[in-house]
Every structure is written in structure tokens, then in C-alpha cells.
Amino acid sequence: MAAQRSVWQVWHGPIWKRPVWLDLIVGLDADAVRVGTLSASLLAWLWLAGDVASGVQSFCLSGEGLERLAASFRSASASGLLLSEAWHWMLMVTAMMAPLLAPPIRHVIGRSYRRRRWRAVAGFLLGYGALWAGAGISGATLLATVAIAGDATTQIAAAAALLAAAAWQLSPMRSSAMRRCHRTMALTPRGWAADRDCLHYGARQASACLAGCLPVMLATMLAFPGVLAPALVAFWLYIERGYQRNDRLIPAALLAGLGLAVAAATFF
Amino acid sequence: MKPAVKGVRIREDVWKLPQWDDTLLWYAKAVAHMRSLPLNDFRSWRYQAAIHEYVRSSDPLAVAGETLPTASKRARFWTQCQHGSWYFLPWHRIYLAFFEQIVRQHIVALGGSDNWALPYWNYSDTGPNAKKARPEFTAAKLPDGSKNALADVVRSSTTGNFGIDASDVDLDCLRRVPFKTGSMGAPAGFGGPKTGFEHSGGIIGDLERTPHGSIHMAVGGWMSSFSTAGLDPLFWLHHCNIDRLWEVWRGRGAQFQNPSDPSWGAPSGTVFGLQNAAGTVVRLTADKVVDTTVPVLSYRYEDISDPLAGAGLGEEDVMANTGPAALVGASEKPISLSSTSTTAVVHIDAAAVTDNSAALAEGEEPRAYLNIENIVGRNAAPSYKVYVNADGKTEGDARYAGVLPMFGLVERSGQEDPHGGGGLTYVLDITDLVRRLRQAEAWDNKKLSVTFVPKDGDKPDNSLKVGRISLYYR
């Protein structure tokens, strides 16, 4: 059993006495993969922040996200609006998830012949991105359908999503997903089977990420649209994944508290 | 039992002690007493074993209705063992030191000496009995006729002869530097790969593989599983020797250094909090336990002389980190291992070899590493000896590459594994073997065959598979 650093071991005691921030910097291997993934994330955050500043309206970035999504689906010029929604969704996924992809990308690079490393990474990212895109499309369709059919508001959806994310935080399925994020797999070295394996690994990684992160991401976008809240959530996910053993109670309590607060603000 | 010197106890070679020396007699009495304490008492035998790992369903000493420590205590103190990590050695050092202090506290309370220290089992020694357990660990009774707790344990043999052979106690790891390497495909290093914030995917360090893992599997029984290993009194002597080998390695020369990476120790390395004999949680980083004579540890070994002295420290012993290792060949599909020999073929990619040779000096041969990746299995399995280009000749050392102990196989393959069940990955340095094969004209630049020969032990089931075998050059 490899290093299982519990958050207990690191966070025990006042937070300002624990050099978690130092480890986040010093513990990073400053190789090309690290630079590449952080750069991709940073560029995505900057683009999103720019769009927020220039008033671009989308589910991910602006208030009344659910109403906005429903309107996109209803609109006569739906395709343009939906493409914009999809673009922002993939930017948000890149911004939040790219830093977490350094270890599996290193695995793909290290376990491939040098001449096919770019192809291997591309296959991995394609498999990873495809699942997230699929999750985005099906999630958006579902939310829009619910919004249109049920006349639901973003606030009600946000409260429900926060409470659901709190419950999910405590579930053993999420713990299992967080562990699966670290799983490596053997890759066929050459030919189409090698491409298949890279796609498979990417998809497998995405399914673990989706199970671990999607509920809280969705809840954040509904409740706290913009860039700041998702960035804070991404930072938390990064620490939680890096320290492996997820201590579930505190984030669950926080999410539940926020959910109740949003629900109270809706109804009172 | 040697007296302490300025508060620093001496850990002695168990095979150099007289029969039923006080060290062993009091150990037996302390173990018996600790086994009588409840599970939720941190000074009990079972609690100390649970710090390594605890799985209720596989606890052989579980008592229905007994009180466990609180969930928060279990999360904080149990199932903490560090494996496949550069923290393997420092964590086990702290674990053993506090265990030793707790045992000594019991011994003093029972009327024994405050000089007591854990003995070590030097199974790599050249004496005729070194590979066997001392008779005191198999005798049914103590000299006074009471039950001997040192023998009240499940092992692969009740005689103390576990069939340990030269491959299990090989000290080739002592030749390896550095403590940790940084390249995928290369051996992880003497002490294990860097982990903590990022993870290596479960690659086992050289010392952890052999003799550490090999001895666990050879002794068998409780010793063969993370969750029950600490219940065997031999576990502590075994890890005492592993800890001693860390001292031996460091004493071999200037190149044998602990990591200088600032993420290993303070201020940014992992902080481990374990309970000392007073029950106080002591928080330590790896750099704080490098010197065993510091007050928090307070021990030293009677012998840390270099068993390989005279073998030289030639270039082949020094793995300078001059560049990344590159994949040059791999198997095309998973390989099932069984209770009989299995041979798989690894195709070598000529273009990859040519690519790699561009980085080598004129006439320089690359270092060669055999990776056995993602070994998974649902049930316990024996260790396997690995041979390259054996052509059926799996006796002797001519084609021998190394041994793969399956210690931690089930834990690493399961859903609860922190790596999500990716299994074990081993890296064998076969540079010397490849050189010998070339000289014997038994090396094929297009492919190599890898043969797995099971040692005595558990019979594997059909879930035991190797994800891939790969060859890396550097």
C-alpha cells in the first residue's frame, strides 16, 4: 500500500501551521507534463475569466444558468448558442481537470515508444475528452428538459445539487472513484491496439473523474457561477486527490450547509 | 542482551544470542502479555499489528462483540503502512521504534530489563542456520513450561525452515544508488519511488522487493498479507533487519545518500503521526529519523558492516541518473501466471533501440531494465523467479533475472487499494544478464523470452495476470 497520506496527517492542527501550500509547490515535478497541464489550465481559466468580464452568458459562467440553458434549447438559433455552451463546458473541464491529468499523461508517455508518444497522449486526451463531452451533452439535455418541463429555477436546482453533492461526498462509490483516479493500466505497445488502449485509458480516467468531481462541479456552476468558485473547488479537488484519502465529513458538511442556505434563500 | 550505552539500546543479531537469551525470553513474555490486552488498547499486540493494516474480515484473532477503537482513531492510526514509496524505510523505522519502546515498557513492568531492544534476523548471513527461524520461535513452550507466544502463529512451516533460498536473501539492492530514481521504466531505487503528492503507480523499490517481500512470502501464513503480517513476532525481527540494511547501505560510500529532494523531509514532506509508548502522538518527517541514536529512536545495531565489502563499487553498481529510460520492447497482451512455468515473448522494437542508442557514447552499452507491469490477482500467489532467454534451462544463475514476491498482490489488486487496483509493478535491472547473454551468443536483438517459475507457496488461481512485460534501455 503506497503512501496514504490522510488529510488528518497533514491538516491536523491550525491550517496556517501546515505547509500544504509549500508541498503544492515544492512537491511538484517541474517537467514538461506539469508545465503543459498547468499552462492549459491557466489559459482556460484566463479565457473563461475574459468571457465573464465581457459579459458572455452561459450555463457555466453566468447566473440563472438553468433558465439560460433552457432558453438555448428553445431558441431558433439554438446551434450557435449550444456550441457556445459546449465550448465553455470543455474550457471549464480543461481549467479544472488539466492539473489532475499530469500523472496519467506521464504514464502514457513513459509506457509508449518515443516515436508514438504524441499519438498516445492524443489518444488518451481524446478518450478523456469524449467522455466529458458526452457527460456535458447528456447532462445539459437532461437539465434543459427538466427546466423546460418543470419550470424549475436555477436556485432550486442549485440547492438540490449542493445537497446531492454533499450526500455523494459521503458515499463509498465516490471514495472508490477517487482511488480509481490513480489506477494505471498496461498499454499495448504498437498498432491500432495501442491507440485503442490509450483511448480506453483516457475514458477510464474520465469515468473516475466524472464520478469523483462532476456532482460538486455541477453544484458549483449552478450555485456560484463565474470563475472564482470553480477555481476554489478545483484547488480543493487537487489537494484531495493528491493526498489520496478523502476525508469526507468536512466537505460534505460544507456542501450541505451551502445547500440549506441556498434553499432557505429561495423559500424565505 | 547488551546494556544500553548512554540510553541508546543495542539491537543484536538474533542468531548470535545464546539459547533463550533474555532478549528472546522477555520478548516471548511481552508478546504473551500484549496478546491478552484488548484490541482498542494501543499497547496491545493486535493494535500494533493493525497500525500496519487492519481488515476486520481477515483478522484471525477477531473476537465477536469486542470493542474497536473509534472510527476516527482507526482512520488516523491504523492501516498506515507505506509501501511502494520512498517513505517505506522511514515509516517502518518509526513504526518499529515505537513498537520496541512499547514492548520494552511491558517488559519492565513484568520485571525485565530496560536494556531490551528488538533483535534482527540476518537471513543473508553465511551461517548454516541463517535462513531459518531461531528454535525459540517454534518451540511450543518456554523454559518454565508456559506457552510460547512466539510460536503461536500461522506460518508456512512449523519447523522454522521456510525453504528460504539464495534468491530470497539476495543483497544486490545494496549495490544500487540512488535512493530513488525519477524515470519511468527504470528501477525505483534502493529506497523506493517518490510518492506523496503524486504517485508512481505502485513500483516497488529494490530493498522492498528483495529481501523484504521475498521473506514475507517465504515465511508465509500471517506474514504473507499486509493485514496480518504484524501479528507474527518474526515480522518485527524481519523489519529490524530491513531497517539495519538501510544503515548498511548508507555506510557503503559517498554515493549512498538519502534523498536530497526537499519533498522527502521537513518542511514539505509527509508528516507521520504515530503513538509512542506514552500514547502521545509524535509527528515526524523522514529527515528526523535518519540518525537512529536520536532520543526519539534511541537504538543502534551491533553490526552494520558491509556484507559486500570487497565486491567493489564498479560502474555497474552505480546507477547514475544520466537520463530517462526509454521503452524498447514490450509484450503484446497480458500473461496469465500459473502453478507451472510460463514463458512469454517480448518483441524488441529496432527503431526504438536505434533511437535510444543516439544518446549513448561510442561503444557504450545501455543499461537494461525488465518491467513486469500491473500484476493483479484476487487471491494469494507464490513468488516467481524470472529467467530471460532460458530455453528451458531454469536452474542456476545463468539466465536468472530476479524474483517477484507477490507480497501485497491482493491488496494492490482490490478496489480498496489507493491506486485503484492497478496491481504490483516490478523493475529488474538485467544489464549484467544481457551482457552475459550477448557474450554467450544467447541474445536476440529482435525478441526475448521471459519465463516465470513459481516458488513454493500458495497455489495461484486463474486471476493472476501480468499486464505487460516491457524492456527499457538507458
Image: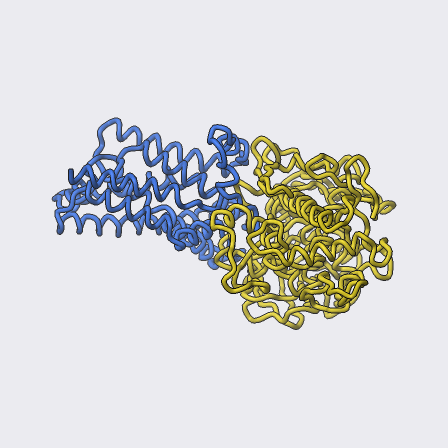
Chain colours: A blue, B yellow
Say which quarter of the image contains residue B128.
bottom right
Say which quarter of the image contains residue B211.
bottom right
> Is B121 left, or right, of B223 in this rendering?
right
Does the rendering let one see residue A110?
Answer: no
B364, A69: nearer the viewer: A69
- In the picture, the quarter occupied by the C terminus of chain A is top left
A266, A186: nearer the viewer: A266
Q: How many marks?
A: 0
> Is A77 left, or right, of A4 in this rendering?
left
Q: Position of residue A237 (x, y in %)?
A: 41, 41
Say which quarter of the image contains residue A232.
top left
Residue found 63% across the figure and 44% down from its top? B91
> Is B165 left, or right, of B411 in this rendering?
right
> Is A118 left, or right, of B211 in this rendering?
left
Q: Position of residue A177 (x, y in %)?
A: 42, 52
Does the rendering let one see residue B410?
Answer: yes
Residue found 32% across the figure and 47% down from its top? A165
Residue found 68% across the figure and 59% down from its top? B232
Q: Position of residue A193 (x, y in %)?
A: 48, 59
Q: Position of residue A138 (x, y in %)?
A: 26, 52
